[in-house]
Amino acid sequence: MSLDFPNAIRRYEPARGCVSFWGSEASLEIMFQIELDVLRSLSPAIIDGSESSFLVAFDLNRSAILGAARAAYSKKRGGYHRLSAGNFS
């Protein structure tokens, strides 16, 4: 089976400094978090520090983010992955 992202839900979590989203493989749910600094670097022109700007940045970069999530998951299969700048170089 392969990692899929059937649910487009993402959640802004300022206390954790990230946006969280979920993927699945077969019956397993995998949690991903992308650091807010990564979203700032992916879309610097639209980030104003608000929740909505981080979620828009996530949506605009969804393909790259999901690609990085798939790559991270393929290296280490686990139920949780936090994506940082190193996942996008």
Image (spheres, grey):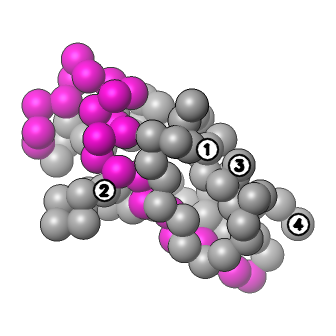
Q: Residues under labels 3 and 2: Cα distance?
A: 19 Å
Q: Callout 4 environment at 10 Å: few (<14), some (14 to 19), or many (20+)?
A: few
**Residue 43 vertical position relative to residue 80 in the rendered view, above or below:** above
Which mark is drawn over residue 89? Answer: none
| Position of residue 33 measured from the top left corner of the image (x, y, whole percent) | 43, 60
Q: Which residue: 61% across, 64% down?
A: 23
* Residue contact between numbered discs 3 and 1, judged by CB atoms under 8 Å: yes
Question: Does the residue at mark 4 contact the one at mark 2 (Cβ under 8 Å)?
Answer: no
Give the label, 4 or 2, closer to the camera: 2
Q: Is 43 colored magenta in this rendering?
A: yes
Q: Earlier in the sequence, mark 1 or mark 4?
A: 4
Picture layout, residue 42 above or below residue 66: above
Mark 3 sits on what residue?
71
Q: CA distance from mark 1 to mark 4?
A: 18 Å
Q: Which mark is residue 1?
A: 4
Hey, what amino acid is under mark 1?
Answer: Ala
Residue located at (28% from left, 33% from top): 40
88 vs 13: above or below: above
Please report contact status of discs 4 and 3: CB closer than 8 Å, yes or no: no
- 81 or 51, which is in the foreground? 81
Q: Sequence order check: which comes first, mark 4 or mark 3?
A: 4
Above or below, 43 relative to 6: above
Q: What residue did someone put label 1 on?
A: 68
Q: Which residues are magenta?
A: 27-50
Query: Which residue position is annotated with label 2?
Result: 18
